[in-house]
Image (cartoon, grey):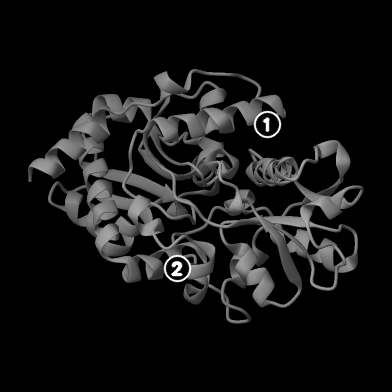
Amino acid sequence: MSSKISEIWWTACPVPSATNIAMALGWLEREFEKDGIRISHISSLPYEDRLSHFTLKHPLLIRDGGGIPSIWTRSEGARTKAIGIVCSEASQAVLVRKDSPIRSVKDLKGKRVALVRDLLGIIDFRRATVKRGIIMALEAHGLTPDDVRFVDLPTTLAYANRPTGPDHTGAPDHPGFKRIKKTSQQIELEALKSGTVDAIFSYLGRDFVLEQMGATRVIYRLNEHPDWRTLVHNAYPVICAVNADLAEEHPDLIKRWMKVLVRAGMWAKKNPTEVRSIIAKATGLPEEGMGTTHPDDFHEHLVPEISERGIDAIEIEKRFLRDHGFINNDFDVRTWVDGRFLDAALEEVESS
């Protein structure tokens, strides 16, 4: 890797994160423009390089997003570091057709539950998320996976196959439906409407959009469960990850990057209205639904950290992925997480 860097590439999932806030505010560009360093989104790269959103293969990439691709990449032996963690809650729900006689998760015994299968994606993060979500819902009601029939729904529409730009706005036909259309949630919704399945799982607040469309009804939200471990899925935790060589050869740049994210997270605590607007745009959800899909205090939990909860959440996710065949190799989470850059950033922010 060249010692002189003229460009840093970034990518972020459509989730609540300090990166999405910092980018909306233009803070990262301003931080590095004085050094002549461009901050560029990977959407302008060739397709193979855009897949670094999931593989982190690009040597000058900083990724902030759902944890499953970063965990998978590390399990495949990639030299990466997890340098920041955010645990911010959003709704996760089990839904049925609006006219379904099913009223609770207990009624799902013997019923058919959708389980998408991405035919083209590098890592099937949505299948993993849906499977864990359904299992958690079943266990919360005294059931097991053996009590339902999982119905495979093969799809090539998964978001994993469509690395896009940083703009995640809604579609004109219904606010937020663009996000539904470009993911496998469309396949699940069609299966539910046709009667192929009796229930589907939705996360990141998309249950609000589905209910507003008038086709579905929520029978259970995982957020009702008192144990936070139940909430662990692709976007809980959100992991900021980076190529290890980039971090080791340019630690000051990574520290400065994290300093901006810390400032963005702190800004979010004081500006809840603006944050809801930014995150609504980033996730493709209608802004008026944010009060339903996210806790009132979600804006207070967007400062990256290296906490025991965050590390435990990664471990829980990794263990589930390993036990259910989504990753083949184990690794030590605590040695993967490197808090030096964040610690240095926090120290500078607190002393300024």
Residue 214 place in picture, x, y as percent:
72, 78
Q: Which of the 4 quarters of the picture holds residue 24? A: bottom left
Q: Is residue 204 above or below residue 253?
A: below
| Residue at the (57%, 71%) spot, across then down | 176
Q: Which residue is mark 2?
A: 281
| Residue at the (90%, 64%) spot, across then down | 195
Which three-letter amino acid code belongs to the residue tagged 1?
Phe
| Residue at the (31%, 47%) spot, across then down | 303
Tell me: 57 left or right of 265. Answer: right
Label 2: state its secondary structure. helix
Tell me: 327 left or right of 3. Answer: right
Q: Which mark is residue 137?
A: none
Residue 73 place in picture, x, y as percent:
53, 30
Q: CA distance from mark 1 to mark 2?
A: 30 Å
Residue 74 place in picture, x, y as percent:
51, 26
Q: Which residue is mark 1?
A: 326
| Residue at the (49%, 24%) spot, across then down | 78
Which three-letter amino acid code belongs to the residue tagged 2?
Lys
Residue 340 in view here: yes
Q: Is residue 142 above or below residue 154?
A: above
